[in-house]
Amino acid sequence: MAYINIDNKKLKELMKKEDTILIDIRTREEYEENNIENSINIPLNNLLFEIDELEEYKEKNVIVYCRSGHRSITACNLLHMEGFNKLYNLEKGIIGL
């Protein structure tokens, strides 16, 4: 599998590590309404166009989330194809927090 599904508890554990980045792949409007602190917003539609911005994080833990955990699966698969190997999908998205 290209990624590991995580829950809220595991999210908190991973966020304590310095080598972790959090990517919100919802639209800019969704992100502005509500987001997880210190996350980077790159909408799913822009992910491949902005992949170079994430190059420095290839060897880090990358947690991806969306509203409910579905778009983030697609994002994890795309990132895996681009060489990211430490991928985590927030299983129920932001609504599960």
Image (spheres, rainbow, N blue to C red):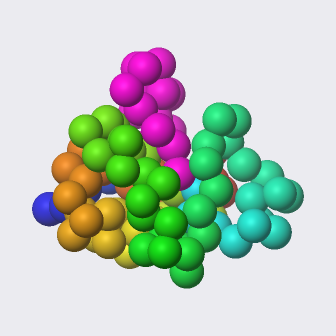
Residue visible at 53% across and 51% down?
23
Q: From this viewpoint, which residue is outermost toward the left?
A: 1
Q: Position of residue 79 (x, y in %)?
A: 32, 63
State yes or no: residue 89 in magenta.
no
**Foreground residue among 72 and 56:** 56
Q: Position of residue 37 (x, y in %)?
A: 69, 36
Residue visible at 29% across and 46% down?
58
Q: From this viewpoint, which residue is outermost toward the front?
A: 52
Residue visible at 59% across and 62% down?
42
Residue visible at 29% across and 70% down?
77
- In the figure, 37 relative to 28: above or below? above
- In the figure, 7 relative to 91: above or below? above
Quadrant into which the C terminus falls: top right
Q: Which corner quadrant of the image does residue 24 belong to? A: bottom right
Please provide the residue range marked out in magenta.
6-23
How many labels sit on residues? Answer: 0
Residue 81 in sight from this viewpoint: yes
State yes or no: residue 19 in magenta.
yes
Q: Which corner quadrant of the image does residue 29 belong to? A: bottom right
Q: From this viewpoint, which residue is outermost toward the right?
A: 33
Residue 70 in sight from this viewpoint: no
Judge left or right: residue 43 versus residue 7. Answer: right
Quadrant into which the N terminus falls: bottom left
- In the figure, 20 relative to 1: above or below? above
Q: Which corner quadrant of the image does residue 59 belong to? A: top left
